[in-house]
Amino acid sequence: MPVYEADRFEALISKTNPDAVIVTTKDSLHDHYICRAMEAGCDVITEKPMTIDAERCNAILETWRRTGRQLRVTFNYRYSPPRTQIKRLLMNGVVGDVLSVDFHWMLDTNHGADYFRRWHRNKENSGGLLVHKATHHFDLVNWWLGARPETVYASARRAFYIPETGDRLGLAGRSERCHDCPKAAECPFHLSLKDNGHLRELYLEQEQYDGYHRDKCVFSADIDIEDSMALTVLYDNGVRMSYSLNAFTPWEGYVVVFNGTKGRLEHKCEESVYINADGSVPGALKREGTWIRVYPHFAPAYEEPVWDAIGGHGGGDELLLRDMFGATAENDVYGRRADQYDGAWSILTGIAANSSLRKGKPVQTRGLVPELVRM
């Protein structure tokens, strides 16, 4: 199979004439290939986040409008059975009209630390966790509520993955990467690329070609993304959300609560521990740590049996692939298929949050992306 360098993308399209282009590059380059593919007459499937800032988002939407091509964003968490179950319960009015949401996501010290080793550690590449990771979460809320964010106020900092933490752990004299670090035996965050077949073949053995170091020190001063953040978000239907993300917790998963006119819905989900591309299943649901409880007004509380979920991202991966590439399109009664609008609104909360951090005040999403106003 021929290999095309990045600057020969149009030649690749011309030669192979694909129906669709799947974009899985570094986040900051998503817009580059999404727009070029649509300009070349192709539909596009992109991983989340669609892009990392308002200007690139606007360029994608303008290109989509002008070319008329199809753009799909792959939010596999929408397809996770327990998340779909929450959507169904809300659609059925189990808590009436939702008035407020509390949503708290935990990344454990395996998966969470991994964002501070890789290219995600710099905002120019990823938009920070408020865009790269939290886009999953903000999309779920948009989808669960059938609403759009209007105002975002954010507070965040890098509090754990800092040089001082490494020093407190007795790791003075550490290297800028794990490979051959003199403190490897003492560091609980050490990642050995050479001792894992998947990581060795995918990264370590390719360094001579791409110069990419997959195992940079999580306590490096070069990191500029936050590891703990809190947001208040106002939606266009009047719902207010309190959200937090911490990337250094002892367990992985989330707790989300919906308070409504008829009661309260609580959902806790624990996920399996993994490091990206280490060969394990990413984000598999742990049954013993997952539940859904309903607290009606003026009636006893009860627990809903959680829908079965097997596989990556809470069981969503296989269902997404089946819906996207299956021979027969499934009936999407929950509206799980996401397009360019969903992709844009999912990142706007994080983009507005980054702006709020810079300005120190609430930020309105309206006007950040002019093309959304036109549509």
Image: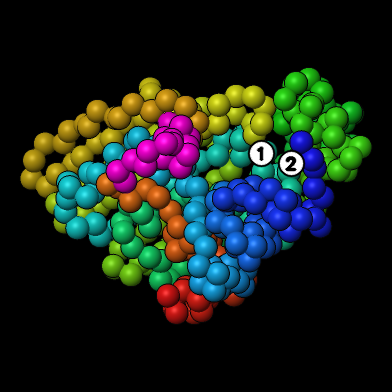
Give the magenta part as a residue range. 314-332
**Quadrant that contains the C terminus:** bottom left
How far apart are the two marked residues, 2 and 1, measured between alpha carbons?
7 Å
Which numbered tag is attached to residue 113? Answer: 1
Residue appearing at x 33%, y 26% in the figure: 308
**Residue pointed to by mark 2:** 117
| Residue 39 in sight | yes
Assess whether mark 1 and mark 2 are in contact (beta carbons under 8 angstroms). Answer: yes
Quarter of the image where one finds residue 329? top left
At x 12% / y 47%, what residue is drawn? Answer: 297
In depth, the one of 198 and 275 nearer the eye is 198
Q: Is residue 93 magenta?
A: no
Q: Main secondary structure of the magenta part?
A: helix
Q: Residue 193, located in which quarter of the rendered image? A: top right
- SS category of the residue bearing label 1: helix
> Which residue is more in the foreground, 129 or 340?
340
Quick check: 19 left or right of 78? Answer: right
Q: Nearer the viewer, residue 167 or 66?
A: 66
The amino acid at mark 2 is: Arg
Which residue is nearer to you in this view: 52 or 161?
52
